[in-house]
Image (cartoon, grey):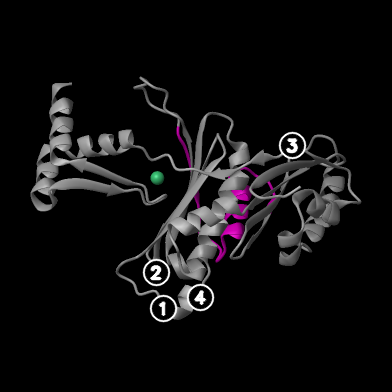
Amino acid sequence: MSNTDHLHKFLFDNCDIRGEIVSLKQAYRQVMENNPYPPSMQKLLGEFLAIVGLLSSTLKMDGKIILQAHGNGPVSTVMAECTHHNEVRGIIRQNPDIELTDEVALAANLRELLGQGVIVITIEPKRAENFAGKLERYQGIVPMEADNLAACIEHYFEQSEQLATRIWLTVNSQTAHGLMLQALPQQIASAEVNAEHWETLVTLAATLKPAEILQLNHLDILYRLFHEQELRVYDPRELHFACSCSEERCIQALVALGKDELEDILTEKGSVDMDCQFCNQHYHFSAEKVRQLYQGAMLH
Ligand SMILES: [Zn+2]
């Protein structure tokens, strides 16, 4: 069995600890093909994709989970999202005012890339058609208190949910991989037993090597790490790259710009052209079409 683009959840039977393991290969490659980035930015985006894959298992309703960060460093924005339908996409933007030195382009951590910044987790329910009410949107701020993303997310879970969490991210040119262990509210074992298991499991998980991630599938990795534990592995979810852009959404954005702005663009360029930053899909609107759009919008 190949573990290309899968998420497995697992549960230990004799203690209150759960886990998840995610690998993105195909989807990760597609994100990178659409926008080639220098190695350090590629690695950071890969980490965001792996985390959003792990977090997506908590998505209970139709919608999506978005992990994004903004900063004042060489990278201004990084964003990855995963929908309820297992569609993953992501993007990272350079700050046009700050030069990306060769050193930083090759290897730099979260803080060196983003500078001072903030990471936000958003859970966004899908807007049903004809629904005009307010959507229940959840937003959590992840303080950038460490120089790597995994540690920031661990800290967030400990602070906001009081759940001890450990995350190991491995990103190279082929794979964005994540392994997570998380303590659950005490239910089946004593606090002492849970603490003992936590220490053992974290120690075992930390022995996973990048070469094993490349060579082994998830079940073999879990066996290699935890074969002495009573472990229950659930059926995997398959993740894939997909973009939610559409002509319809472009039209909504155009109409929102308003007549004056659209006329300015038409005067300058003769038509309106939009490129999706996630998938490079190109959308072209002739002057005639644009005028139809805003005239149509005014009638409503
Ligand atoms: Zn797109």
Q: Do the residues labelled 2 and 1 touch (CB within 8 Å)?
A: yes
Relative to the observer, which residue lies in front, 86 or 286?
A: 286
Asked if 194 appears above or below 209 in the picture, the reply is above
Is residue 154 in the magenta section? yes
Q: Where is residue 18 in the image (x, y as percent from the top left)?
A: 75, 43
Mark 2 or 4, closer to the camera: 4
Is residue 217 in the magenta section? no
According to the picture, the residue beneath numbered tag 2 turns out to be 74
| Mark-to-mark CA distance, 3 and 1 | 44 Å
Q: Which of marks 3 and 2 is nearer the N terminus?
A: 2
Q: Give the range drawn in magenta.
A: 137-166
Q: Are marks 3 and 2 in contact (CB under 8 Å)?
A: no
Q: Earlier in the sequence, mark 3 or mark 1?
A: 1
What mark, if any, has residue 122 been given in the picture?
A: none
Q: Which of marks 2 and 1 is nearer the N terminus?
A: 2
Q: Is mark 1 within 8 Å of ligand 1?
A: no
Q: What's the residue type where badge 4 is placed?
A: Leu
Q: What's the residue type where badge 1 is placed?
A: Thr
Q: Give the residue displayed 71% in from the left and 39% down from the top.
A: 236
